[in-house]
Image: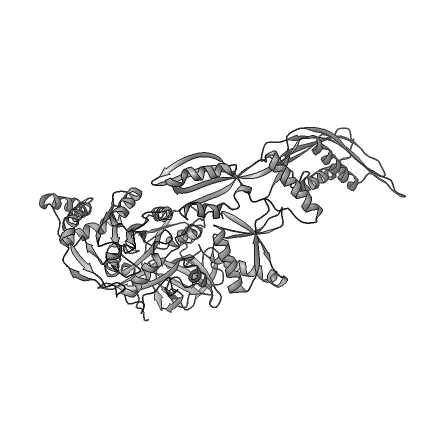
Amino acid sequence: MALRTYEGKDIRNIGVAGHGGSGKTSLVSALLYSAGATKTLGSVADGSTVTDYDEEEIARKVTISTGVAYCETGNPKVKLNLLDTPGYNIFLNDTHASLDAVDSVLVVVDAVAGVEVQTEKVWSFAEEFEQARAIVINKLDRERAGFDRAVESIQAAFGRNAIPIHMPLGEEKNHRGIIDLIAMKAYAYDVGGNGKGKEEAIPASLADAAQAAHEKLVEAAAEGDDKLMEEFFDKGTLPVEHIVDGLKEAVLHKRVFPILCASGLHNIGSDQLLNFLAEYMPSPIARGACPGSATAGGEATLSRKVSDTEPLSLFVYKTVADPFAGRLTYFKIMSGVLKSEATVTNYNKSEPERMSHIAVLMGKEMVPVTELHAGDLGVVAKLKDTLTGHTLGDPKSVIFYPPVILPEPLIKFAIEAKTRTDEDRMGVALHKILEEDTSLRFERDPQTKEFLLGGSGQQHVEVIVSKLKKRYHVDVTLKAPTIPYRETIRGRADVEGKHKKQTGGHGQFGLCRIKMEPMPRGGGFEFVNDIFGGAIPKNFIPAVEKGIIDSAARGYLAGFPVVDFRVSVYDGKYHDVDSSEMAFKIAGSLAFKAAMAEAKPVLLEPVMRVEVYAPDTFSGDLMGDLNSRRGRVQGMDNKGSTTVIKAMVPLSEMLTYATDLTSKTQGRASYHMEFDHYDTVPPLIADKVIEKAKAAKAAGGHVEEEEG
């Protein structure tokens, strides 16, 4: 479909966000259909929505990656760029990164469930980016839907400045329309129709409630504006046009968060929602200048106005690896005007990039445009060096916009190619997927030699495995990673290491005496040369150290590296003819083993700092579960209806936690985990780990650990 060029003042970049299952994708489909951008009302059930087009999304019926679409609405015309974002916790990093590109957020709340855990999470993202917000209560046609209950939930979570500007005409199976509390008009809709309401009188049974809600709305619109407050106190009310003006300012400055009504599935309220987004949500220009820095990662000492007259700059908020079109780069024009075929500079790489065939997105369809103005969103294919978080623009006017910093992966799996052919292809395929999903990590563990793929949860990693097979024809298997245990000592030792071997020619002789003692946790390894009088020549001392280091790397109890100890070599003997570096290296190794036998060796395990975010009702069960995992609960905080549990838990007990947490809380909880320290493994568990390690070594394999 043909698309005319829009200036920044006529653009609205809106992120549609909320908890998984709240109906975001259906709502976006309804908006596109009602605005005439699509010919049919797409359905998640049959996989026909514009923004959920990936085969994984269609199969799983959940949004995995942010989908972008646009429509034109209003008179005069306004362009709405709609970003349909994931709502489930394991895909929420994509939401976080994508919301950086919008200027306002439409938060979708399920009329049955109310505010859920991820609703609060996406709200915090909008707060981080200082964005205007509105809330739409969706699925009012569902059984057990309750508008008043949902409003109470919203106000409990986000404050009393979340105020209804709509009321529903009926609920559950009787939901048929909305009441506009600004104009005090009712609109009825045909279920599954074109989204255009028919005006009718407000039912007498709802008149008093509507009038009371209207008066609260008028008061909220007047607050913060002296003239409107004066008019309100003088007349007791405000005309509609003044309410609109007051609300626009209140929304822009985040004094009011309007609450609206809709049913995306049955296309009820879409026209009113479109009108609201066009009229009340701020344009990119209205938000003011964008902060930036003179160097990548530097302090924000610069700013750039969102204006066509400013030097060109654009920020890359997302990258998609398309198997047919190649790398797709999603960007926002921060300033200036971008023309198709223009050459810009990638500031992060100091390399030129040609912007051939720029376009805007309608789901997976790229609609060509000749130019894009400041504030608009676009896409371009096949840039050479540009990745998510990069800034491009005029080489004479450099500015860097800060990228979103995403948390480290919560879960890692060991990944193995099934065949040699898969092994050859795996690295290249994963590299392309890593460009697309910056929350993933792919690395080789230097200790276990395993390739590890890390993501936000088990389902996240499984989706990547499915993409590897379907997109790139690479078959891999996943398994729990080997826990990177360590070994250390708790006691001291004073021992001798002697290597003596006599052959027909020169023999081998080296003798060293060492003292071993523990160091504080995290101390690593320290080697001290306390030789006096030449008992061991200086040129052989490094060989002793090398023998100890090599033996420590191979471990003593179970084959895991030995850490946090100090060795002092204080005496020894050598032979003028038979001594060599190799002899003293072996002597050092023998001394190390003798010292370990005396110095009370123990096994260490990685302990993780864990924060669990869950509704209050689950807190008791979740604390009990963490205790059963040998966790030590450090404390609890309350944020609205969400409880944050802080604990220290061994990594070996957390391998299945993402899946278990989802099942225990019906997907309403999330958690964050990062390494904190190493601690001693309890004797009974250590014995099992050591026994398994010895069995694996005897069988010629490697160690795989218990999953908690």
Quick check: is 555 in the magenta stretch?
no
Image x and y of residue 42, in percent: 34, 65
Image x and y of residue 335, in percent: 35, 58
Horizontal relation, residue 13 to residue 620: left or right: left
Q: State the residue at coordinates (45%, 56%).
A: 388
Q: Quadrant of residue 635?
A: top left
Horizontal relation, residue 32 to residue 658: left or right: left
Name the dominant secondary structure of the magenta segment. Answer: loop
Image x and y of residue 114, in percent: 31, 48
The residue stretch that appears in magenta: 383-387
Q: State the residue at coordinates (45%, 40%).
A: 611
Viewer-nearest residue: 204 or 7 = 204
Viewer-nearest residue: 684 or 704 = 684
In the picture as drawn, the residue positioned furthest to the right comes out as: 504
| Coloration of the structure image | one colour
Q: State the residue at coordinates (15%, 44%).
A: 229
The image quadrant where one finds the N terminus is bottom left
Image x and y of residue 566, in percent: 66, 32
Quick check: is 384 in the magenta stretch?
yes
Whether residue 73 is situated above or below residue 584 in the rendered picture: below
